[in-house]
Image (tube, rainbow, N blue to C red):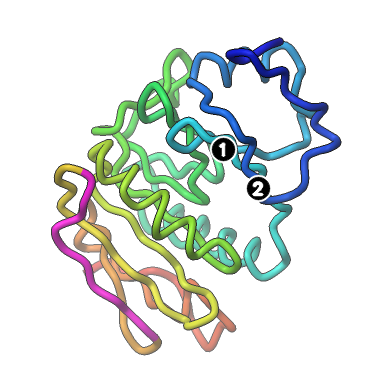
Amino acid sequence: MAVGTLTPPPARTLAPDRVIPWRCSVDDYERMHATGIFDPDLRTELLDGRIFVVPPAGALHSSIVDRLNRLFTLGLQDGAIVRVQGQIPLSDWSYPAPDLSLLARSDDFYARRHPSPDQCLLFVEVAHSSLRRDRETKLPLYAAAGIAEYWIVDVRRRLVIVHRDPNEGHYGWHATFGDGQSISPQAFPDLLIAVEAILGPVGGDDRPRQT
């Protein structure tokens, strides 16, 4: 299938973290997947018309995503849908796959349609080798789409950077949390999650607390 005047190379030739060099719409991106141009085991994201090939997650990255999944699932119960690495179209040109999303409740779990940006309560990206992309590429895209809250888990520095109040491609508020501190999602202020519970190693009871 041609996109513009270019024909994508076979998926097996694409190196991890490579940006495929042509602008692609969400419609083209979905058709490319539907027609089998991409290997189904190849994880990609469409960000502002650019297709990024995402390298396989390492053990530490995966463990932090698993911790976040457990913390939010236990802490929120049926208060929200916790989606792990699921792709969500945000515009005609962006189809990201946040490491974790909190979505507003839906009886069918969004089986018939994707959640709209105003139903996306929180996006979380775990940044081990991807900090620059998560901060410089995804942050303005998420803000422009109106994603209410965005966390970047900076693995190397053991920090969680929280962004809120999106407006015209920027977040109007941000704060940084480190070891010894706890964070509450804006949509669920009674849920407290310790930074150590996200990043590990576990040092005691890491279950979220309701106040």
Left or right of 107? Residue 16 is right
Vertically, is 135 above or below 24? Answer: below
Quarter of the image for the C terminus: give it.
bottom left
Q: Tell me residue 19's x, y (percent).
A: 62, 42
**Left or right of 121: which side holds 75?**
right
Which segment is the magenta one? 169-178
Q: Quadrant of the N terminus?
A: top right
Instruction: Quickly name the residue at label 2.
Output: 54
Residue 81's quadrant in the figure?
Answer: top left
- Residue at (27% x, 52% y) in the render: 149
| The stretch drawn in magenta includes residue 41 | no
Most foreground residue, 78 or 145: 145
Residue at (34% x, 69% y) in the render: 161
**Residue 100's disc number:** none
Q: Secondary structure at mark 1?
A: strand
Which of the two discs, 2 and 1, labels the residue nearer the N terminus?
A: 1
Residue that protrudes farthest toward the right in the picture: 12
- In the picture, measured across the screen, residue 150 lies left or right of residue 28, that is left
Residue position for label 1: 45
Above or below residue 33? Residue 52 is: below
Mark 2 surroundings within 10 Å by alpha-carbon count, few (fewer than 14), some (14 through 19), many (20 or more): some
Residue at 64% across, 36% down: 20
In this rendering, position of residue 14 left or right of residue 72: right
The reply to whether discs 2 and 1 touch (Cβ–Cβ < 8 Å) is yes
Q: Quadrant of residue 117?
A: top left
Placement of 161 over or under 102, stated as above or below = below
Viewer-nearest residue: 17 or 63: 17
Identity, as a three-letter code, of the amino acid under mark 2: Val
